[in-house]
Amino acid sequence: MMRTHTAGELRAGDIGTDVVVCGWVDARRDHGGVVFLDVRDHTGLTQVVVDPSTPAGADAHRLRAEYVVQVSGTVRGRPAGTVNPDLDTGEIEIGADALTVLNESEPLPFPLDTADAVDEIVRLRHRYLDLRRPRMQRNLRTRSKVNAAIRTSMVDQGFAEIETPMLIASTPEGARDFVVPSRQSPGSFYALPQSPQLFKQLLMVGGFDRYFQIARCLRDEDLRADRQFEFMQLDAEMSFAEQSDVLAAITEVIVSVVEAVTGDPPPPLRTMTWHEAQERYGSDKPDVRFGLELVDLGDVFAATEFKAFHAPAVKGICVPRGGDTSRSQLDALTDRAKSLGAAGLVWMRVREEGVLESPIAKFLSDAEQAATIAALGAGTGDLVLIVAGERRMANAVLGQLRLDLGRPPVGAGGLQFLWVVDFPLFETVGDDGRPVPAHHPFTMPHPDDVGLLSTASGDEFLALRSQAYDLVLNGWELGSGSVRIHRSDIQQQIFGLLGISADDAQERFGFLLDAFRFGAPPHAGFAFGIDRLVALLVEEENIREVIAFPKTQSGQDPLTGAPSPLDPTLLRDLGITLLPPKRP
């Protein structure tokens, strides 16, 4: 073997042991002949002392940062006064007997110890260097632990790991497909899967009643901190299962993952309905690590003479110790509320003895002011913010202001997992009076609402619930799932409401509907994003930091130059002719 030990594992108990370590030169210090080297690998670093009078000394003076070396020598204790308590190997050093340069390195394009301050494009262009840093090593090795824990938990629960195709037919999934031209069928294209959704449902028909896969999925959509073109997800499906069975299985996975990474289980996973999440937090992915909860003030202002509060909903939040917010900051908050869709924002400072200072205070009775303070639990020095208007808008605006004002850093407040259940079946109603689905059209309605499908109309559709559920962590949506429709009568009813004719359904989903004719079992499933979960576990704000070779926010790969033009010969073989580029 080229090494007997890694650079970070040696301790005082190894003193007197002959060892061989390999790694990169992290630092070199020449102390008048004796050379001190810090040799680093992914486990850490160890100090090596090279005496110029030994055979190892021949190469020591020509070493530079990031040279790859092999060091043979004896572990010894550091002299008194030179122990480094901040280093795991700080009690020992290696007295080098032999030193071999395995490879040289040119000067690096950026120093690894200050890479966080380097432009991200430079880091990604030289990602292989960026990956040497302890931060990136930690992130990707944590990701490996997460994948291993997922597999172990799923197998222990009786799930079978099955791979589904990467080249499929284009199916409506809500985002644009990435497409691949077929050389053997010119003019025809494969699509890369946005998810294994239809295939995993086919596996249920095929009798694999517990399926999982760590699946690569691709979606051609705008990138952001928590979104990449390609991403990895735990994908799972269960037959003869209800919503509670899926939540229990995925909860067990989450507990196993968190224990594998942190050593401790997370707090018990809470469950909250979509309606409660909207009313209390103004979001379907609420961050429950902090307060600033939304409060309904409808009863407080039911008989108010202030016309702006004559609205379907009046909601407020209390910002503790926010009473010293400057007028310019309050104006900025008002502009922010307007940009989010509100007609305006009412602010009130709570002064001593429950007195409200606000431009609208003169329009409110003493009873209304007192009731506002009581309803919001506000005290002296606090700031009250109120939005009036349509309920969905008021919730959304205050929900975002709540995050702007109070959301803690990604690593603060621990891991607060939350199941959000009972999502609406439809998200809006189109101009033609037809409901617009909030999920894919195979989502089973809530059992208490199935009978209302045939009688609902207009906005009544918006009150119908689905058996869809999301997993949320610290305000990030980790994943979603649902109980699937397996009964043809309910499926036809949903298709009819959506205006999908039998011919359209056959053209779009024919291979799945055909399979359902031959005994589809009741089934339900779920998928969560591994990139997002790992990012939160290692306290990163951007999933690019937990992906080995990510794309930039503009979709570019600085390392390989992708996307790039194709050779004209390849285009000809594929039967593709490029149009002239569009003029700006």
Image (cartoon, rainbow, N blue to C red):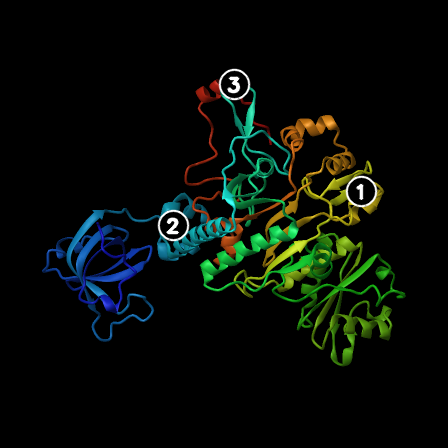
Q: In what element is the residue under mark 1?
A: loop
Q: Nearer the viewer, residue 167 or 575?
A: 167
- Report the number of numbered marks: 3
Q: Earlier in the sequence, mark 1 or mark 2?
A: 2
How far is mark 2 from mark 3, CA to CA? Answer: 40 Å
Name the spot of residue 254 as percent of width and height, x first.
53, 56
Residue 498 appears left or right of 482:
right
Q: Earlier in the sequence, mark 1 or mark 3?
A: 1
Name the spot of residue 287 as percent of width and height, x first.
62, 60
Give the quadrant of the C terminus.
top right
Q: Which numbered mark, 1 or 3, is in the foreground of this view?
A: 1
Task: Tell me, yes or no, whether the two marked residues, 1 and 3, touch with CB atoms within 8 Å.
Answer: no
User: In which image quadrant can residue 303 be found?
Assistant: bottom right
- Residue placed under numbered mark 3 in the picture: 575
Residue 300 appears left or right of 336:
right
- Residue placed under numbered mark 1 in the picture: 453
Q: Is residue 510 visible?
A: yes
Circle 1 residues within 10 Å: few <14, some 14–19, many ≥20: some
Q: Amino acid at mark 3?
A: Gly
For residue 131, the mark is: 2
